Image: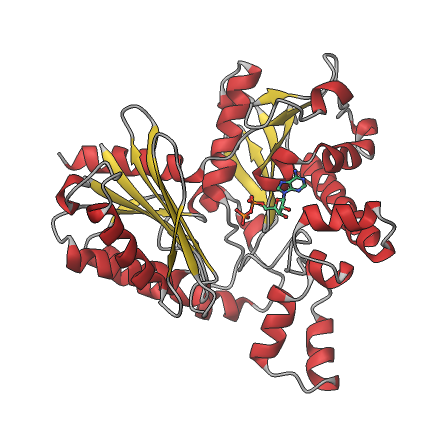
Amino acid sequence: MRVLVVNAGSSSLKSQLIETDGKVSLMKCLAEKVGTPEAYMNVSFAPDFHKTTYNVADLTVEQCLAKLLEVLVDDPESPISGLQQIDAIGNRIVAGGEYFTKSVVIDEPAREKLTACEELAPLHNPPADACIDMMRELMPDTPQVAVFDTAFHATMPAKAYMYPLPREYYDKYRIRRYGAHGTSHRYAAQQAANLLGRPLRDLGLITCHLGNGGSITAVNHGKSIDTSMGFTPLEGLMMGTRSGSIDPAIVTYLMRREHKSFDEMDAILNKKSGILGVSGVSADMRDVLQAAAAGNELAELAIDMYVYRIQKAIGGYYAAMTRTDAVVMTAGIGENSAELRERIFAGLAHMGMILDHERNDVTGQIGVNRIISIDDSPIKICVVTTDEEMRIARETDNLVSQLG
Ligand code: ADP
């Protein structure tokens, strides 16, 4: 089945055309800085994936998607020449709230529930919904599936997902923890089980998705029992530009002292904090590592804090589970930074997570799923390459095949 995967963000669009039978990608697209005059869109096709860059200045996310469809039909390198050659569309949706505990084919009732979820991820869900609507109009006969970042965490028990707030706010607004990055955590857990050669249901795993955003999940016997992101993807770890968990009193204090509006405060916590806010250098870990190596003390502090918060989260989830067989590292930083893994696990050896320095080395190993702990480490450490688009494509194929 040929599935167009659409991953719409607040200011980005990622898309791939995937042939699910051979599990191969036929087209890759990344649009960034969407909505600004600097917006651009890179599109490339198999087998060489030479990028062509398109100017998409000031277009919305769904307009970028429309532009991509034009390219798909018109470009001589494209594997398709008409939209009817796309069998299904798989949409990544950040927040599914309590409405969606698994992926669904988007029919009328599901589309209505998606609107109800928009306020849970006001930056991410509305552009994704706009893409769905645009595609429904353009390709009304092509089935669309929604795959939710939150669905994997639907198994969390109430003690993990409830906040210690007055009950009325849960009753009225469903304020609770939903988690995120679920597709990635589920995939990382399954890949780790393959590496360990044991069924997922027999294992206790701590999966660490460390990219621009970051979250850690306790996967007990294949089920998410707790995760670090909460009501929104702001809770938990320190991230590229997000603060992660802080004393909530700081928010009201700053709003009073500096007369910040709600939107300004939101921007401070989501866009100006985290690694960028502490280091003053960049949100990109590579830049910050470089600055620290050159003696920048604030960059060093940012890395120290980042590592320390991850160590504490791993320790917390160790306590939450009935057993811990492995810690799994995935996403940009988790997969690629041997230095950060070294620093994280240097503090966790006493818990039985013992890194093998040679196996941890990345030379020639980028993209290779592997175990990087020493042979008799009581708890194994795994590295797994995340492939969100492929997972969404396969999930879409599954559901659409059931439609007959
Ligand atoms: P997203 O969450 O946007 O999908 P990614 O998973 O691609 O992000 O992760 C991006 C992060 O990974 C950036 O901070 C980037 O600096 C970091 N990263 C990528 N490669 C390396 C590397 N070799 N060393 C350190 N950090 C890296």
Seen in the picture, residue 249 relative to 157 is either above or below; the reply is below
Foreground of the two, 94 or 389: 389
User: In the picture, which quadrant includes the C terminus?
Assistant: top left
Residue 250 in the image: above or below residue 245: below
Quadrant location of ligand 1? Answer: top right
Decide: is 236 above or below 115: above
In the image, residue 40 lies at what x, y percent? 43, 58
Q: Is residue 323 visible?
A: no
Residue at 79% over, 51% down: 291
Q: Is residue 116 left or right of residue 269?
A: left
Q: Is residue 217 above or below residue 176?
A: above
Check the picture and name the quadrant holding the N terminus.
Answer: top left
Q: Residue at x 61, y 23 (%)?
A: 365
Could you tell me residue 32's position as x and y percent? 46, 57
* Left or right, 30 with reference to 87: right
Classify residue 265 as left or right of residue 176. right
* Residue at screen point 72% across, 84% down: 258
Q: What coloring was used for the rendering?
A: secondary structure
The image quarter in which residue 380 lies: top right
Across and down, in percent, residue 105 comes to 24, 46
Q: Position of residue 111 (x, y in %)?
A: 25, 59
Q: Quadrant of residue 398?
A: top left
Which residue does the image show at 16% across and 57% down from the upper left? Answer: 138
